Amino acid sequence: MKLKLRHKLVLFVIIGAVAISFVGLLYVQRMQTLYERLVYEEASDKLYLYSERMEEKLNEIDKFTLTLVSDPDIQERLKQIKHEKGTLEYLTAVSALKQKLLTYPFHDYSIKSIVIVDTSGNEYLAGSLADAPVPAHDSEMLRLAADKAGASYWVGGKEPMTFLSVRQIRAVQNMDLQPLGTLIIRVEASQVVSLKDKKSTRYNTSLIIQDGEKPVYSDTGEALSVELPAGFRNGEKAGNPEPYSMLSVKNHKYLATYSTLTYTGWTFIHLVPYESLFEAAVFMRRILLVLYGCIFAVLIWFGLIFSRSITRSLEELTLRMAKVEKGDFSSIHPVPVKKPDEIGLLTINFSKMADRLDHLIKENYVKQIHLKESQYETLKAKLNPHFLYNTLDSINWLARRNGQAAISKMVKALGDMLRNTISRKEIVTLGDEITHLNNYFSIQQFRFEHRLRYEIEIAKELQELYLPSMILQPIVENCMKYGIDEMTGECEISISGERFGDRLDLWITDRGPGMDASYLDAAEGRPSAAAGAGSSKEEQGKSSGGFGLRSIHERIHLLYGDQYGISIHRGLDQGTTIRISLPVITESEAAG
C-alpha cells in the first residue's frame, strides 16, 4: 500500500477507533436484545396467567349453561312448545318458560342476558337486551350449536364487547336426546377478560383476541386484527413457536406476546408500546452513540496530532536528503532539535554527515575536476582535430602535386582513420569497422611492405550487422606487434566471420609464435598454466601488451553478458586464433 507514514498512522488510529466503537455498539445492542427478550418472556408469562383466569371464568359460565339446559321444568316446557303448538297447553308452557327464566338469578355479574330459542325459532329471554340485536340469534349460530350435539361453544365478534355462549338443548329425561331448542348466554367481554391491572396501565397496553384471523375482541373499542405468526394460525398453537414478536399497528411499533386458549381456541395478543417500554434503553443507546461519536472525533484529532509530530521531522529530513542528493548543500546548517528522540538524533547526525561530505567535495572532488579540465583544455589546444584534418589534407595535396603517390595514399588513410576515430559512434556496422581496418592496413603496408599479408573474408550480408566500434583494429594491431614469424620476419593475418543463429563469431588468426590460451583467465584472477618462470619471452611480451585485448573482452561482457566475449585458441603448429563472440544486432535493433 503506497501511503505516506503520516497517512498510515492516521489510518491505524481510525481503524482502532472504529473497532472499539463497533465492539461497544455491539455490546450495547446485545444487552438491549437480552433486555427485550427478558421483557418478552415476562409479558408472555403474565399473559398466560391472564388467559388461564379467563378460561376459568368461561368454564364457570359453561357450568351455569349446563344447569339451565338440564333443568326439568325447562325441558318439559320446551317439549310442550315443540309438540303442542296452537293449544292451551302451548300458551301455558310459553308463559311458564318465561317465568322460569326469570327465577334464575344472574350469579355472575358478567352475564348480560339469557336467550332460549325453541325449535320454531321463537326467542324467550331474560336480562338486559338494550344493546342486543333483534333477533338475538341467526341460522349459522343454530347450525353450529347442532353440530356440537349439546356441547357449548363460544362466539365472539357478533356484538361489540360481547361474548356469546351457545349450547343446543336436548331432551335428557327419557335419554332420547331430541333437540328442544338452543340456549344463548350473552357475556360482557370486559368483565371476562379483565386483563389490565394497575401495574401495567402506565405502558398503555392493549389486548386483542382473535379467532384465527377473525377479530373477536379489542379493548381499544375498534375491530382490530393483526397477522399471527405461523404457529398461532388456524385457531390453534402448532409446534413450538416463539410467544412474542415485533408488530407495527397503525404506524406504531409494539411488542406483541401471544397465548392460545385451549378452551376456545382463541389467540390472546398483548400489545405493549415499544417506545414506552424501551424508552430508557433507547435513550441510553442514543447517549452512547453520541458518546462514541465524541470519542471517535477526539481519537482522530489526537491521531492527526500524534502522526504529525512524528512525520514532520521525517518529512523535513527527507526534503533535505533530496537536496543533498541533487548536490545542493546550501541548505545544510545545524537544525535545532525540539525532541531528543531517535528522529532528532538522526537529524543531527545527517547534518553532520552532509556538512562533512560538502567539505570533502570542496577539498578534493572540485580540485580534481578543475585539474582534469585544465589538462583537457591543454591537450585539446595541442591536438585540435580540425587543425590535424587541415594539416593532413595539405600534406596530401602537396604529395600528389610533387608526384609522391605513396605519401599521398598514406596521409589520406591516416586522415580517414583519425576522422573515423574522433567522430566514431558507439555502435557501427561491421562494414564500417572493416573500412577502418583497411585504412589501418594501408598505413602499415608502407612499413612492412611485402612482409605484411592480410586477408578479410566476411560475407556482405554480415557486414550489415552492428557491433561496438573499435573492436577489430586493436586486436589486429596486437597481432602485427607480436605475431611476426621469428624465422622469416613476415606477418600473415586472416580475418573471417560466420553467423550461428543469434550469435556472430569473428575470427582473427596470425602465424606468429603463439599466445597463452589461458591469458584471459589469468587476467580475471584465475591461475594460468603457462604463466610463471617458464613463460616464453613472446608470451611475457603479449601479457604486457595485452591491455587492449582485455579491455575489449570486459567491454563486451558489460554490454552483452558473460556468454559473449573473446576466447584465445592456439594453432596446430604455431600462431594464435582469437574468436570474438557477439550477439546478432540488426539495424532496427541498433536504432532502438
Image (cartoon, helix red, strand yellow):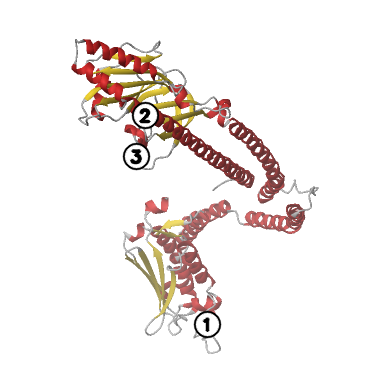
- Could you say which quadrant of the image residue 509 lies in? bottom left
The amino acid at mark 2 is Asp
| 227 to 585, vertically: above or below | above
Q: Viewer-nearest of labels 3 and 1? A: 3
The amino acid at mark 3 is Ala
Q: Earlier in the sequence, mark 3 or mark 1?
A: 3
User: Which one is in front, 180 or 508?
Assistant: 180
| 87 to 345, vertically: above or below | above
Q: Is residue 372 left or right of residue 494?
A: right
User: Pointer 1: residues within 10 angstroms few (<14), some, or many (20+)?
Assistant: few
Task: Quickly name the residue at label 3.
Answer: 238
Where does the image place residue 330, in percent across and percent down from the top left?
75, 46
| 466 to 316, vertically: above or below | below
Where does the image place residue 449, in percent across and percent down from the top left?
43, 72
The amino acid at mark 1 is Pro
Give the structural element (helix, strand or loop) at label 1. Answer: loop
- Could you say which quadrant of the image residue 91 lies in? top left
Give the structural element (helix, strand or loop) at label 2. Answer: helix
User: Which one is in front, 285 or 521?
Assistant: 285
Where does the image place residue 4, in percent across and percent down from the top left?
61, 46
User: Pointer 3: residues within 10 angstroms few (<14), some, or many (20+)?
Assistant: few
Task: Quickly name the residue at label 1.
Answer: 527
Residue in view at x 67 percent, y 48 percent = 318
Using the image, tell me which numbered label, if any, was put on residue 62: 2
